[in-house]
Image: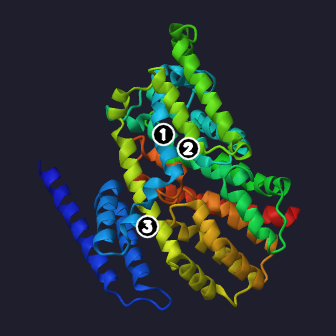
Amino acid sequence: MAHHKYKTIRQHYKQLFILLFGTALWFFPIPDGLTLQAWHLFTIFISIILAVIIEATSIFTASIIGLGFVIVTHTLTTKQAYSGFSQGFILLIIIAFLIARGVIKSGLGKRIALLIIKRFGKSSLGLGYSIVAADMFIAPAFPSNTARSGVLYPIVQALSSDSGSKVADGTRKKLGSYLMMTSMAGLTISSAMWLTAMAANPAGAKMAKEFGVEISYGSWALASFLPSLIAFITIPWLLFKIFPPDLKKTPNAPVMAQHELEHMGAVHKNEYIMGFTFIAMITLWIFSAQLGIDKTAVAFLGLGILMLSNIFTLDDLAHEGRALGTLIWFGTLYAMSSYLNEFGFMSWLGVHISNIIMGESWPIVYVGLILAYVFIHYFFVSQTAQMLALFSVFLGVGINAGVPAELLALMLLFATNFNAMITPQGSSANVIYLSSGYIESREVYKYGGVVTLANTIIYLGAGTAWILLIF
């Protein structure tokens, strides 16, 4: 009882600190080059982020308060503040989360999980590597890392629950938290490894062409091969050390998985329906650009088929409160981040950082630009938005300072992907994992920050040396 009271008092002190911090920043003199509106929006946004980092409140609560505040203070209009809720890719996250329940409920998720456990299940680390390897294998065919997370997530969830690790009974850290965090980290590597693994990559390559830099599918794959391979070897192991599962060794798991598969028997009707629906969705996601089909519409159709088949029901929807919570907090932060960019705050920050390192030798400018680009992602909710806002600015500054153009262009584009785990909202692909309940926001800030640091060291170190060697 005393411990709970102490915890509550500490929580109130943290909330008071956020209130004082936000108030002081709100009335702070506006920096040159920024409007009052941009500065006030930044104040609200950074206060939300800080509140989550120091655990003053949950990301949902902080976002709700922030949403009300931006409207009451006329920092954003109601249309601007609510604009995030109309974004198709945010709805895609929510629908993918609901479809994942169908994969589990149909039994297909359990069957796939048991097959993976049968092959790789002697250790939790082996399962972590198998998930990331599967992601890297399918990534070239998926121009959307959000859609790819929708494929991987139900498998990871099934692996977790069938290993006796569940959110509901307080055993999330037995295995599920590690696997969810590892899969989320794997997306940062797979997206950087292939030109077609994330929507922003081809757009960035096109922008680089305006600076005389030609980036082809082959040159991207060759440049990213070594650092991505090192990251693949390092990251699951690193998380295993700093964010370990309670269940580490499972020597009998493959045998148990085989017995369970025999007990399940032949594939039944619901598994077939779920499997065909899932494959159809994946196929349409892969070829969505060529066919001119919206990915979110594909997800809605898939969910509709599952509902017609009673694999997913309205009762299931009633139990998925986390999906609604995700829609609210992510939609809110997305809108704020978008208007921070539109109001010129992001470009202002990028230019000021660039000016600080101008005049230094090109290696210092190069490292400074990449580090700044990674850090600035704290303020972005969209990887693509950051790339569109800052890529040309940073590339232009670096080239003028003598940084090899191809090296800088590739590393900035790699960073657009490998920095995605720096915050819970750093990528739309992160959100579905966070919504599972296996991972908490503060854990993403902490361990996601470590993963981002490790990625940055690997790509800046081995990646730079490799690119200079081969080009």
Vertical order, 352 against 221 (above or below): below
First of labels 1, 2 by sequence position? 1
Question: Where residue 32 sits: x, y (%)?
Answer: 48, 92
In this rendering, the count of numbered labels is 3
Q: Where is residue 110? Give x, y as percent.
A: 51, 22
Q: For the residue labelled by badge 1, is the local secondary structure a helix, a strand or a loop?
A: helix
- Give the vertical position of 449 relative to 262 (above or below): below
| 322 left or right, relative to 190 | left
Q: Residue furthest left?
A: 1
Asked if labels 2 and 1 touch by Cβ distance under 8 angstroms, the answer is: yes
Q: Quadrant of residue 155?
A: top right
Q: Which of marks 3 and 2 is in front?
A: 2
Q: In which quarter of the image is residue 140?
A: top right
Task: Classify residue 248 as left or right of residue 466.
Answer: left
Task: Report, in whole angstroms, how far the alpha carbon at label 1 lies from the one at label 2.
Answer: 8 Å
Q: In which quarter of the image is residue 265?
A: top right
- Secondary structure type for disc 2: helix
Most foreground residue, 245 or 402: 402
Q: Residues within 10 Å of mark 3 (few under 14, many from 20)?
A: many
Residue appearing at x 75%, y 53% in the figure: 195
45 relative to 83, above or below: below
Residue 103 visible in the snapshot: no
Q: Name the residue under label 1.
A: 95
N-terminal of the pair, mark 3 or mark 2, is 2
The residue under the point 72% across, 64% down is: 204
- Distance between the alpha carbons at the discs numbered 3 and 2: 22 Å
- Which residue is labeled 2 in the image? 296
Question: What residue does disc 3 label?
Answer: 336
Indicate the secondary structure of the residue bearing disc 3. helix
Q: In which quarter of the image is the C terminus?
A: bottom right
